[in-house]
Amino acid sequence: EIVLTQSPGTLSLSPGQRATLSCRASQSIRRHLAWYQQKPGQAPRLLFYDASSRGTGTPARFSGSGSGTDFTLTISSLEPEDFAVYYCQQRSDWPWTFGQGTKVEIK
Amino acid sequence: QVQLVQSGAEVGKPGASVKISCEASGYTFTSYYMHWVRQAPGQGLEWMGMVNPNGGSTKYAQKFQGRVTMTRDTSMRTVSMELTGLRFEDTAIYYCARDMSGTTPEYFEYWGQGTLVTVSS
């Protein structure tokens, strides 16, 4: 099973700051990675697929990058609605797996 | 617009079974795989498996093999997930999630609202 390790566990930032979230895979997953945003009490929302392809409605301040084993989700300037938990997910091999999540909280 | 509406909360005893449904609308039902993902309280996301509404074939995470059954009813545009042999650690919100691709399974683009399953004696 491919293990995805996200770091940091929690990111404490202020609105307007830049957020950089990492997801590392236990083996190469090429670019078969997605990022999801989840707010309390809501289902996750697809932000990026295939590492850097933007999902429907994903704002331009979000960007995804990486390939192989190292991936990054960047939020260039945090808006109040961006404070949430972010998960990465791989579809390279079965079973599909998620990272444990990074919480972006208001400092 | 695509909508996935799940059945209501369930409570089950250890060893019992639970069956959750997910009614789809707004797209061609048989064209997209449907997945089930669960989330224990305060925890992360876990993929359980998927069903192909076009033919009914399934693929399950090995962790759930033998305990989970995913089915579809094309006339009702509904997929269902039954979990047997409930354990306390099965307490979670269960989501159905429609795949984004109409060819091979890829990612989870649309999600249901979630169904809370509580295992309690």
Image: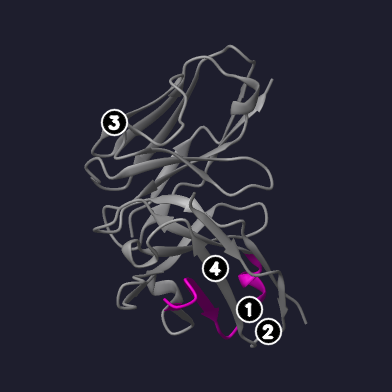
Disc 3/disc 1 C-alpha distance (Å)? 38 Å
Disc 4/disc 1 C-alpha distance (Å)? 22 Å
Say what secondary structure mark 2 lies in.
loop
Estimate the x, y position of residue B113 in percent, counting from the top left.
61, 56
Estimate the x, y position of residue B118 in percent, counting from the top left.
71, 71
Q: Amino acid at mark 2?
A: Pro
Residue beneath disc 4: B22
Q: Amino acid at mark 4?
A: Cys
Say what secondary structure mark 4 lies in.
strand
Estimate the x, y position of residue A98 in percent, counting from the top left.
44, 51
Say what secondary structure mark 1 lies in.
loop
Q: Amino acid at mark 3?
A: Gly
Q: Is residue A88 left or right of residue B43?
A: left
Residue beneath disc 1: B87
Kindly identify the residue that appears in the image at 57 percent across and 18 percent down: A78
The earlier-in-sequence mark between 4 and 2 is 2
Label 4, residues with CA under 10 Å away: few <14, some 14-19, many ≥20: many
Q: Are marks 3 and 2 on the same chain?
A: no
Disc 1/disc 2 C-alpha distance (Å)? 5 Å
Front residue of this view, candidates A1 and B108: B108
The picture quadrant where one finds residue B90 is bottom right
Q: Are marks 1 and 2 on the same chain?
A: yes
Front residue of this view, candidates A55 and A5: A55
Estimate the x, y position of residue B16 in percent, counting from the top left.
65, 87
Q: Which residues are magenta?
A: B71-92
